[in-house]
Every structure is written in structure tokens, then in C-alpha cells.
Amino acid sequence: MDLRRRQLLKSGLLLGGAVAGGWALSTVARSQLMNPCLAALPPELAGHELIAQAFDGLDLALLRDVHVHLAGTGDSGRGIEMTPRMLSPLHPAEYVQRLFYLNAGCAHEDPGRVDASYVDRLHNLVEALPAGFKLMLFAFERAYDEAGRHLPEHTAFHVPDAYARDIARGNPDHFEWVCSVHPYREDAVDALEAAARDGARAIKWLPPAMGIDPTSKRCDRFYAAAARLGLPLISHAGEEKAVHGAGGQELGNPLRLRRALDHGVTVIVAHCATMGQDIDLDAGRGAPPRSSFELFARLMGERRRGRLYGDISAITLRNRDVEVVRALLRREDWHDRLLYGSDYPLPGILPLMSLSSLARAGLLDAAAAPVLEQVRDHNPLLFDFMLKRLLRDGRHRFANSVFEAARAFPSA
């Protein structure tokens, strides 16, 4: 890393804490910051007993990572868009954010090769996963206003449905795809039906970034179509740190997803709403905020027309309370409604994870940490899967069904 890049990295981290928010990365050595992007696991590591243990007892054909992002700069000419702010050192926080994300995905900075090298890395990583294990690749919708007009100034990045579809079609043994359609678009139902015909497995929303209010009547025709087509909705809930956009944080309140459930939509709450606070909509406007996870738990306790799940992506990041991880491990009554997800490329951003913190909390055997760190240097996807398989709180661990996530998608 040259001197100018180091200075930009340091200034961006100090100005925004853009990647994880608020904890000082600038004092960490370079070796602890940047993904080394090593290739295939060396034989002695590939044969380690902890890797075999991670897959023991699982139905490999049902293994899914339900939360994998596609990314790039758009240099492939295939429709990816990225806000100019992420490309400019004049916006240090977003500029550094881009550096970390693309480094985590091992995307080369050679002109014309960023998009392609990100996908090449995904192909490289899945080769180390057993046959049957598939990644669900996300498209990512633009921001829109209430009249259904595109808001380019509020769109941090855009990954078209056609791009995600084509990448998945290029490797159907390892990839599936998830469409992303804004419900305020005039052609939203037509776009959703087209995605279903093209094999989309689900729908991805990030309401604060996209400007979507899940409680709006504007969503009703979209919900009706999603229920009819049998497409689950994977929607972010809780505080959003990674992507800035058109809406406020209140749009990520998990209780706002009741409207989709009441229309019969299967809803998957990304990250189990494990970060931030939201207004308790059941207690009125004057009520104090409650943790988003507490509101998610309330939603999990309700019985509505639609089926409710939570994905466990990002729950082990530094910006989550380890006690939330403990709670998820202990809620064995939820495990048939929890789904494995990595939130890739985030597992490849080295400072976002602290294995020692998990070990101090008694959730991870400290002896496993060095092996996991070696695996992460070569394969962040395998690392994240192993970590969540190894998490323990006494006798509590995530059930096999959490990782056999294909069961949540009926057409699998």
C-alpha cells in the first residue's frame, strides 16, 4: 500500500468510522486491516479436522448462504452503478468504504477488471465448498421517491437483476440469485414477474437505503404479487451503517414488516435486526425506543399469515453485542426459522471481526481461533460458515437446520 493510500485510509477511518462505525481502525497494523486474498487452502489446512467437523451431519444439498452481495464499479459495462462519492478522495468515509469492500472481495483495481475480478474471486471461493452448497447472489435496487421516480443522488450503488441473474446462470452448481425490485416503481409487478420467470429465488430490500416504507399502501400490489409467486422477501431491519440512501433509519423497524406478513409474504429479516434501536410502534409515538432485536423477537412470537424467518448474517461483527449472539444460540425454539447467511464480502474485512471477543464471552473455543484466522486469509466464505458452526453457549449451538437453508425456498 503506497503512502497516499495509507493517508487516505487513515483519514477516512478517523472521519467516519465508515466500515463499522466509531471504533478506531487507524491504529491497527496494515496486516490486520487488509485481506491478503490468498488462493486455495494449502493441503494441511484443507484437511484440518475443524473443517470436516463444520460439515458433519449436514445435508449438503440443502446448504445455502442466503446473504451474498455482488459488487463492482461498473467497469464491465453490465449495469452496475456506484455513487461518484465512493470514487472520490474528497469523500473520505465513502472512499475508504469502497476500498475495504472491494479488497474484501479481492477485486483488482486494474481498469476494466474490477467487476470481473470480484466474480472470479467468488468462483475461486466456492471451489472449496462441498458440492450442493450454493450462494444466493443479491441484486440491489436503486433508490426511488414516493412517486416512483429514480433518485440517482440517493443511490449508493445498484446491481441490476439481469447482472445477478447472468452471474448465477454462469455457475448454477454453486450460485442462485435474488432479485431486487422497488415496490414504488410503476412496473414493479411486471419486473417481479419477470424475475420469477428468470429463476429468482427471493427479493432483496434495504428500506433505509432504497427509500421503502414497508407499511405503505404503495407496497400492497407488490406484496400480493410476491405471495402469489412464492418469492420470499429478504429485508434489512435494524440500524444500517453500510449503505446511505433515500430514507431514514425508521424504515428499518422490524415491526414495519408486519404488512408484508399480513399479505401472506414469507419474510426473512436480515441480521435478525441485531443492531440499533427503533420506536416501539405498538406503544405509541411517545414511547422510548427499544432495541431492534427486541422488536424482532416480538415479531417472531406472533402468528401472522406469512412465514417469518431471520438470517444470521453479520451477527458476529464487532458492532453487534455478543449477548445477542448468545440469545440466538439459546433460542432453540427459533432455530427452524433461522437461516445461515454470511453478508459476504464483510467476512473478508478483517477488522470487522474479533474472534478473541467471542472467545472471552465463552462463545468460541479459543483453540479454534488460529485455525479460523488462517482459513479467513484464504476463504472468508468458509471462515464465516465454520465460525457459526463452532459457536457454542454451553450445550447450545445452532441447529443443523439453520445451515440447511434451502428449506425456506419452496422451489428448491
Image (cartoon, rainbow, N blue to C red):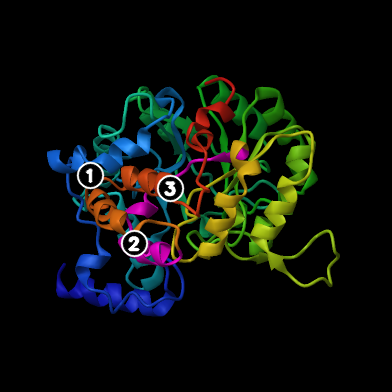
Residue at 13%, 38% (x, y): give it: 43
Q: Do the residues labelled 2 and 3 touch (CB within 8 Å)?
A: no
Please state which of residues 162 and 275 is positioned toward the viewer in this rendering: 275
From the image, tell me which residue sits under label 2. Answer: 87
Local crowd at mark 1 within 10 Å, few (<14), some, or many (≥20)? Answer: some
- Foreground: disc 1 or disc 3: 3
Residue type highlighted by circle 1: Arg
Question: In the image, which disc is placed on residue 113?
Answer: 1
Q: Are marks 1 and 3 in contact (CB under 8 Å)?
A: no
**Magenta span has 347?**
yes
Q: What element carries label 2?
A: helix
Please state which of residues 317 and 164 is positioned toward the viewer in this rendering: 317
Residue at 35%, 22% (x, y): give it: 173
The image quadrant that residue 226 belongs to is top right
Residue type highlighted by circle 2: Leu
Classify the position of the N terminus by image quarter. bottom left
Q: Where is residue 140 in the image (x, y as percent from the top left)?
A: 50, 44
**Magenta span has 340?**
yes
The image quadrant that residue 84 belongs to is bottom left
Q: Do the residues labelled 1 and 2 touch (CB within 8 Å)?
A: no
Magenta span: 337-361
From the image, tell me which residue sits under label 3. Answer: 388
Q: Position of residue 58 (x, y in %)?
A: 43, 29
Residue type highlighted by circle 3: Lys
| C-alpha gap between disc 1 and disc 2 | 16 Å
Of label 2 and label 3, which has the lower sequence position?
2
Please state which of residues 338 and 206 is positioned toward the viewer in this rendering: 338
Residue at 56%, 20% (x, y): give it: 411
**Residue 143 visible, this angle:** no
| C-alpha gap between disc 2 and disc 3 | 34 Å
